[in-house]
Image: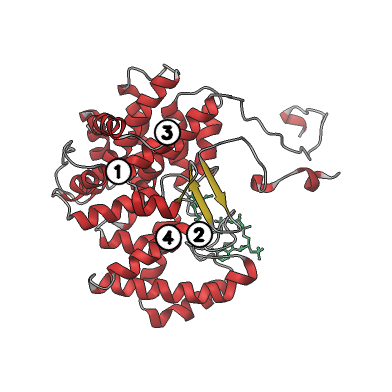
Amino acid sequence: MDADDKIAVGLEGVYVAKSSICKVDGINGKLYYRGYAIEDIAKNSSFEEVCYLLLNGKLPKLAEFEEFKKALYAERDLPEEIVGIISELVGKASPMDILRTAFSALSGFDEKLNDNTEQANMEKSLKIISRISSISAAIGRLESKAQYVKPDKSLSHSQNFLYMLNGKKPEQEKADLLDLMMMLHAEHSSNASTFSTLVTGSTLADIYAAVTSGISTLKGPLHGGADEAALKMMDAIGSPENTERYIDEALAGKQRIMGFGHRVYKTYDPRAKIIRGHLIEIQEHADGKVKNLTGIALAAEKMMVEKLGETKGIWPNVDFFSGPIYAYLGVPGNLFTPLFAASRAPGWCAHMIEYWRNNKLFRPLEYYEGEIDKQYLSIDKR
Ligand code: SDX
């Protein structure tokens, strides 16, 4: 066999672990969190309950859920040094770079950092889920030149994000919509950022180091950065009437249309379907900007599905319709991916804890195609 036969580029089609956290059925467009269909989760659950489900493998009883939420809410506060790091970096670094930096510094404030027992990692997971959200909201707040707003422990997770971002308690309809978006982004099996988290943790580095890898990986426009890139594309298109020309030119120029295509889904991403449905609903009563974005998104979807859906298996993914929804919620475009990170935190932590139960260092091979035993010449002879 030659090199190309041995190498699975991008690990396409390669299984790297067993897991009971999430099933992604790319052929039938189905997604399950711990066995529950995403449609049922979206209709009946909450982000906090999804965090409990992903971490513990079952839905909580009432008393378990109340205790879990209390512990989660208690961890929202940020050390003033972390707020200081964010304040220093806003305007100088991108929100994802600030999140990666501020989150990484959080490890210095966790006395259980190097306690790698499952109990300690569960406790650290709650801190991580709470504080990535607080950091992301604080970045958005300080970027808008407003004063930092401390978390409010009487609010739900999603209410608190919008409260820390905008400095006022959100309308329940908007908090509920954000909660739905966070549920839909909470987990997705062995995606690039979760795999990156596992690779780091497989060396027995701590869970903060592992999640810092996940945040770094999520930033790229081929992964978590696609939501912001898709919105930028919609802004560049400008109007539904201009969509066809823009997409035609982009495809002719071999550009990728952000928010479309997926390594696993070769049909419509079930999360995109749910988000699309809510976008159609809200644009009825939203402002002109969201209405226009929705018109552009629907025109782009129609065109891409006709051109590349059936023929190349390139369909809308979770990132495509998210932008107009976040715009409606008042989330700035450059905060979409930090919000994605805040949503994916339970998925990263659940996978890391599960993988550590049967840990094995990730160390793949490269197929070496260079020379060997070359003669070393001193510099005056080269
Ligand atoms: C997420 O993995 C996960 O689960 C991720 C995620 C999660 O919840 O964690 O679901 C979240 O990251 C969703 C994906 C967000 N990214 C984007 O929307 C970026 C645009 N999409 C692509 O770049 C692409 O579809 C990927 C990266 C997502 C997947 O690409 P693959 O599987 O590596 O396939 P490929 O890049 O080799 O593309 C195969 C062909 C190529 O054409 P040919 O060279 O064969 O002619 O399809 C084309 C590509 O050019 N193609 C696209 C396209 N995506 C693929 N062409 C135009 N627009 C696109 N969006």
> What residue is at 32 percent from the left and 46 percent from the top?
46
Q: Amino acid at mark 4?
A: Ala
Mark 3 secondary-structure assignment? helix
Circle 4 crowding by C-alpha within 10 Å: few under 14, some 14–19, many from 20: many
Is mark 4 in CB contact (under 8 Å) with mark 1?
A: no
Crowding near the residue tagged with mark 3, few <14, some 14–19, many ≥20 C-alpha atoms within 10 Å: many
Which type of secondary structure does the marked residue at label 4 adopt?
helix
Residue 135 percent across, percent down from the top left: 28, 39
User: Does residue 377 sit above or below 148 in this rendering?
Assistant: above
Residue 29: give x, y in percent of width and height: 54, 58
According to the picture, the residue beneath numbered tag 4 turns out to be: 229
Mark toward the start of the polypeptide (3 vs 4): 3
The quadrant where residue 361 appears:
top right
Amino acid type of the residue tagged 1 in the rendering = Ser
Label 4 – label 1 distance at C-alpha: 18 Å
Report which residue position mark 3 lands on: 55
Specify the amino acid type for callout 2: Asp
Q: For the residue carrying disc 1, how many other residues have a C-alpha within 10 Å: few (<14), some (14-19), or many (20+)? A: many
Q: Can you tell me whether the CB of the residue at mark 2 lies under 8 Å from the nearest atom of ligand 1?
A: yes
> Could you tell me which quadrant the N terminus lies in?
top right
Task: Identify the residue shown where x is 60% and y is 35%.
Answer: 18
Q: CA distance from mark 2 to mark 1?
A: 26 Å
The label on residue 136 is: 1
Does the image show residue 303? Answer: yes
Q: Secondary structure at mark 1?
A: helix
Q: Is mark 4 within 8 Å of ligand 1?
A: yes
**Beta carbon at label 1 within 8 Å of ligand 1:** no
Residue 239's x, y, as percent? 36, 78
